[in-house]
Image (tube, grey):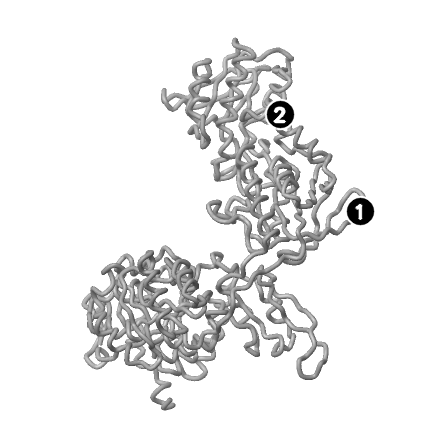
Amino acid sequence: MFFCTCEGTIGLNIDMNELEKRVKKRPEVAFTVKVGNLCKREGQDLLKNEISKSDADRIVIVGCTPRTYEEIIDKGALEAGINKHLLEQVNIREHCDWIHSDKKSATDKAEFLVGGGIARVANALSIEDKEVVLPNKEVLIIGGGVAGITASLELLKRGVIIHLVERNAELGGRAYSLDLERLREDEIILPAIDELTLNEKADIMLNSEVVEIQGTFGDYKVTVNTEDGQKEVVVGGIIIASGSNLFDANRIPEYKYDDEDVIDFYELEKMLVYKNLKVPSTGEKPKRLNFIQCVGSRDENKGNTHCSLVCCTYAIKQAARIKTLSPDTEVYIHYMDLRGPDNGFEEYFLGAQKKGVIFIRGRVAEILRENGNLRMRTEHIELGEVMDFPTDLVVLSVGQEASSGTKKLADMVHLPLDVDGFLGYYNDRFDIVDRRGISIAGCAQGPRGVARSISDAKKAASEIAGILKNGLKAKGVHSVIDENRCMGCKLCEQLCPYEAITMITVKDYITDEVKMVSCVNLAVCQGCGACAMACPGGVPQLIGFTNREIMAQIDELI
Amino acid sequence: MVTDTKAEETVDAPNENEKKFEPKIIGFLCNWCSYTGADLAGVSRLQYPPNFIPIRVMCTGAVDPVYVIKALLEGADAVLVAGCHPGDCHYLSGNYKARRRIAILKKLLEDIGLEEKRVRLEWISASEGQKFADTVNEMMKETIKLGPNPIKSEWDI
């Protein structure tokens, strides 16, 4: 048993010497040591030393919360030859010392807590850490936009066979027609598409849609509706790169998107790519061109609450381009706030200003067509005025929103949607492949530009390829099912939120009868304990949190 | 007796007799939200009576009603089960399972003559250290009003 004083911060209210004295009397305790910092190198060395000196086979660490340094301490214990399941951290810092100012009652409580920890660890099951090998190494990629293509190529580079499902008739998605962020279609997208279509390890299904996904990590059976009828593919992992939709500007009737001289940025982009800038109704070059920002974004009433991140950069770039192509055209950008999350945004902005693009802060109220002329009414916040603006061409910077199939897809793979309807489940600082071998790349998890979609896709692909190749470790806390005791009632199979439990047939060890039993897929199991709770026979056990451990702890605590 | 000075302020027992009663409360805290919330209460030095004893579980969905009953039979005066807010469960739906189980358990407790208030289910997120401390203080107060758990004395367990 180790008492960690957290460099003196524990022990202000608990009498540590008294606690140690009381605990030492217990028959289970082989030795007690006081240390200052088990989470640091010196502490870890001491831990290893002390354990190798004695014959103790279980450790109780009395100190801080396991939520902070559990991994470091587990690692130290493992190096000392003691499995983390045989280690219990008793939290007397946050749960006792720091909150109770009375010395006697705090010490009493600490003794209780330590007793509970001892009881728990004494009843702990010792289980070796398991490596899980995944049976299928192929990957399904949903969506053939820039993220899907990049992920596919990245996986193919690593020798992984891929299946790509694309809803449309051609690959490339929206990025195919974009000439933004210095990524010219003939430089990035086209060669990538060529490379992908020529690769024989790539199974590309165009005009196809995923209709059903069954199975778990390492063994997914996916039904796809293709041009040649239904097809089933078996894969190990899935990358969702289903992208986003552009906001439909018709949902804001004041902006008169049905007028032919009101276009969205995507249509303008096509004009710019072919150097064919003109007012659709007259066929002439526009004299006055107005951009309206945040169409459908940051608009709780008629659009979405989120910011689409890329529209400001796109509009500024387009405006500068127009100024280069046609210097006589007056270009105005009406904005609420200019937001540019990527590098170089400020330079874009300054460059556009130098070229003569005029930025006007204020919301545009409406667009009117009177006597054949287009006009817009807008506020100018800096001047504090409402302005009436004649214009030839209006460009709506429409935002991105979750694509129409996102909800269906989320239901299929049991992923939650975020408030904006995107698959925003992961914090991108952490692992992006979850325990079910599903990873999300590109705009499916929120609005983003081409560059970020590409980096997303590369990250997702390299992570999933690594796991499929090397297998993965079972979670520290996971469930085990004794197949000899399982009666095969399937209750746990239905309750498992991760579909980690499957039914397998085994021979009974006494009668030799063939029977159905539950089996935990350790690649998927997250250790929530739903199965352990549900089983009428108490067969599944959550390692580290078994009934025996918790019952013993309750006994000790009261 | 609750000798903690600050706790005494919050736990103001109405009469001398009850003042001597020191309830014992067991808390099953979910690893991801409420246990971390309790840690935050600790880090923020929010005082609550020392006769609240936490037990870490991975998920409220893994709290077997048997644990609660066991705690009550062993003589705990009240049991707190605390987990993530609805929709926030780390394991997708564990807290909903807990909610259903505790609802049934409360009915059963009434049948065997225990006040349903002795079992409490709370949603306390990792950022709600204050709510955690408040909950414990409030439970202490209520349990003092309820008096000692009768099972232990009646059944002489």
Mark 1 vs 2, N-terminal side: 2
Please state which of residues A292 and A316 is positioned toward the viewer in this rendering. A316
Measure the C-alpha gap from mark 1 to mark 2: 35 Å
Q: Residues within 10 Å of mark 2 (few under 14, many from 20)?
A: few
Q: Position of residue A148 (x, y in %)?
A: 63, 39
Residue A20 in the image: above or below residue A270: below
* Quadrant holding the C terminus of chain A: bottom left
**Kind of element beneath mark 2:** loop
Pointer 1 chain: A
Please state which of residues A222 and A82 is positioned toward the viewer in this rendering. A82
From the image, tell me which residue sits under label 1: A229
Residue at 73% from the left image edge and 34% from the top image edge: A198
Q: Residues within 10 Å of mark 1 (few under 14, many from 20)?
A: few
On screen, residue B72 versus residue A477, left or right, reads left
Three-letter amino acid code of the residue under disc 1: Gly
Q: Position of residue A136 (x, y in %)?
A: 67, 54
Residue at 42% from the left image edge and 29% from the top image edge: A337
Residue at 45% from the left image edge and 13% from the top image edge: A356
Q: Is residue A155 visible?
A: yes
Q: How many marks?
A: 2
Three-letter amino acid code of the residue under disc 2: Glu
Pointer 2 chain: A
From the image, tell me which residue sits under label 2: A187
Residue A101 in the image: above or below residue A411: below
Please state which of residues A469 and A46 is positioned toward the viewer in this rendering. A46
Residue A124 in the image: above or below residue A524: below
